[in-house]
Amino acid sequence: MINLVFRLISSLLLTTAFTFSAPFVLTGMILGLFLVMGYIPGCYWLATNCAGQIMDFLAVFGNGYPLQGIMVISFAFAFVGGLFDLFNFYRYQTMSGQ
């Protein structure tokens, strides 16, 4: 029983940590790509406009602050990822007969 609870908690913590960090990593990679793209001659306008659009999109979820927006999206991802992990754990337990 203790082993089962330990497996559930460790799996749940890992899943929520990874799903929480995924929007940060993906958004950072996209903004970094636009930053590098801004150094290419002729692409500065496109890079700044695309990065501005992403920041405006994030600001919608954060009441005007892009950092709060990415935090809200990350918490939503972590919550849904945790629910999927709990469902998967439950299904595994019922299918294996434990």
Image: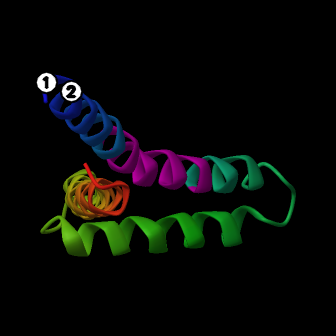
Q: Residue furthest front?
A: 97
From which residue to which does the magenta span run? 17-30
Q: Is residue 21 magenta?
A: yes
Q: Left of 1 or right of it: where is 47?
A: right
Question: Is residue 86 shown above or below 1?
Answer: below
Residue farthest along the right direction in this orientation: 41
Q: How many marks?
A: 2
Q: At 13% from the left edge and 24% from the top edge, which residue is drawn?
A: 2
Q: Nearer the viewer, residue 4 or 84?
A: 4
Q: Secondary structure at mark 1?
A: helix
Quarter of the image for residue 55 reads bottom left
Does residue 20 sit above or below 13 in this rendering?
below
Find out whether the residues at labels 1 and 2 contact each other: C-beta distance under 8 Å: yes
Q: Quadrant of the N terminus?
A: top left
Q: Where is residue 14? Give x, y as percent.
A: 34, 35
Q: Indicate which label's residue lies in the foreground, 1 or 2.
A: 1
Residue 15 higher or lower than 83, as above or below: above
Q: Nearer the viewer, residue 13 or 98?
A: 98
Q: Is residue 41 left or right of residue 17?
A: right
Q: In the image, what residue type sits under mark 2?
A: Phe
Task: Name which quarter of the figure residue 47 lies in.
Answer: bottom right
Label disc, if present, on residue 6 of the rendered structure: 2
Residue that mark 1 sits on? 2
Disc 1 residue type? Ile
What is the C-alpha distance between the residues marked 1 and 2?
Answer: 6 Å
